[in-house]
Image (cartoon, rainbow, N blue to C red):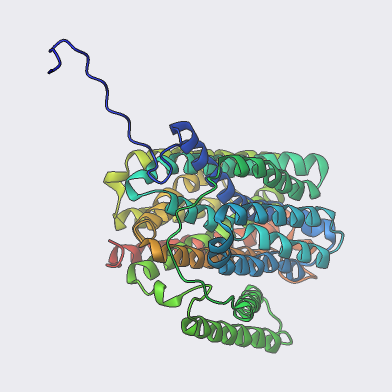
Amino acid sequence: MSASPSSPVAPAPRAPLLAAYPHLRAWRVYAFGAVLGLVASLDIVGAILIAMAGPRVQQGLGAGPQEFLWAFSAYAAAAVVANLVLVQLAGRVSYRRFTLASLVVFTAGALGCAAASTLPELALARLVQGLGGGGLFAAARILAQYASQPRERLSLFWGFGLANFTLVALAPWLTAVLVTQHGWPLLFLLQAGLAVALLPLVLWLYPRTEPLPPRPMGRLDWPGVAAFAAGALLLVHALEQLRYATRAQGPVLAAYAVVGLALLAVVMHRFSQHPDPWLNPRRLASRRYLAGLVFYGVFYLVSGAWNYAVPAFMVEGLDYTLAEAGALLSLGGVVTLASVVAFHLALPRLMRKRRYIALGYVGLAASFALMALAARPDASAALVPSAVLLQGAMPVLALLQVAMMTFVEMPTEDFAHAYAFKSIVREIVNALGAGLTVLQLHHGGEAAGAALQGVALRSAAGELLAGLALACLLVAAIAPAQRALK
């Protein structure tokens, strides 16, 4: 019998937000995305905080600028190992277990950093911290890719982006307050506390089953991983010290660089011949991917420099308190968060637009130039907040646009390798940017004391920031001509 016209029609059941997990309610999907974002932010927050409070840590340990570079290099080298082992280990034990283990190791490293009384102790603890934290961003991002189909990803990335950028925005202010009141060890205790707080959230909200793509499991190439990490460490350390190396240091740094490059070349060849390598170079040959990787690396290189130079310049050169500098930098982070929301809302109109990448680098150049002008004796006090707020609006154009164009649409079977290698590049260039800045502002052990005094540091910071502005303008000029990015 047919239903009468007046009979109510039952509403069609709502499709699940994630086809791989049809039993998850909407709030659980958004919460899962948010926890993924918080996990991913832990590594980025750690890099921002060590850069921001770096001068306090360096002074507290009585370390010279060249020695302090090991605090950056050790973490970067360990993070390279974490990203190399990520695809294989997570494929064996699950991304959930990999994340839980990484959080525990990161916490142990952060506690070791807080307890360190000498630079070698800090560098060793940073090595442990990097082993735990270095793979967290890539692990979270890869799991988000595997857990969702292309049309479903916005459901995860609303929570992912909001949680990630909110924590990144809060971190400078919170760190500045804690370090000012209780000393630099609180910098690392905060990181340990964040990692511990994430453990129950991962246990609760990460799915226990993961729709990973089928793949053969080859033997674990630990010698290749160790050689790659050693090569990256030697090369980064040599590049960091290159500009201010003395004639006596030249041969040693040259040897570091040559050995580092040789190790990297041998390992990439070794991986290319491996039946199931930790990282498969053959899967990274996409022209779009490689072009995007260059722009991605440039962004994190200048970001590493900005994250160290600007807080040091504001506190030591412009007489801001650390709490005031942290509050202003967090305000810039709030601008980034608002820009991310606007970016997602306008995504169809912004996608695949090379000119927006160029616009992002023009904006970065303007923010660096404004900050460089603030180093002049007669500069307006408004230049610094203007520069910070402008810089906060640019990552959505200079970074997210590249990510959308080069990483989101990568085939599932290649995504893990591509994203792990992208994270390796980020760790290396971020450490390189911060390390070069340490020496620019405080070059030479004998000059370090003077360089920390207002006029000398303002001059060094102004020179550095002006150079970064010119570099960003060059990138902005190149971006529209990249046919691969379309």
Taking the image as drawn, is residue 72 in sight? yes
Residue 398: % across, % down: 41, 55
The vertical placement of 408 against 219, above or below, is above
From the viewer's perspective, tell me whether residue 310 is left or right of residue 398: right
The one nearer the camera, 385 or 21, is 21
Residue 426: % across, % down: 53, 63
Residue beneath the point at 40% across and 73% down: 283
Q: Quadrant of the N terminus?
A: top left
Residue 336: % across, % down: 48, 43
Residue beneath the point at 76% across and 70% down: 67
The one nearer the camera, 132 or 190, is 132
Instruction: Work out which residue is located at the far front of the displayed protein and give it.
Output: 1
Q: Quadrant of the C terminus?
A: bottom left
Residue beneath the point at 48% across and 65% down: 422
The one nearer the camera, 486 or 225, is 225
Instruction: Work out which residue is located at the far right of the displayed protein and give it.
Output: 117
From the viewer's perspective, tell me whether residue 352 is left or right of residue 106: left
From the viewer's perspective, tell me whether residue 212 is left or right of residue 124: left
Residue 236: % across, % down: 62, 74
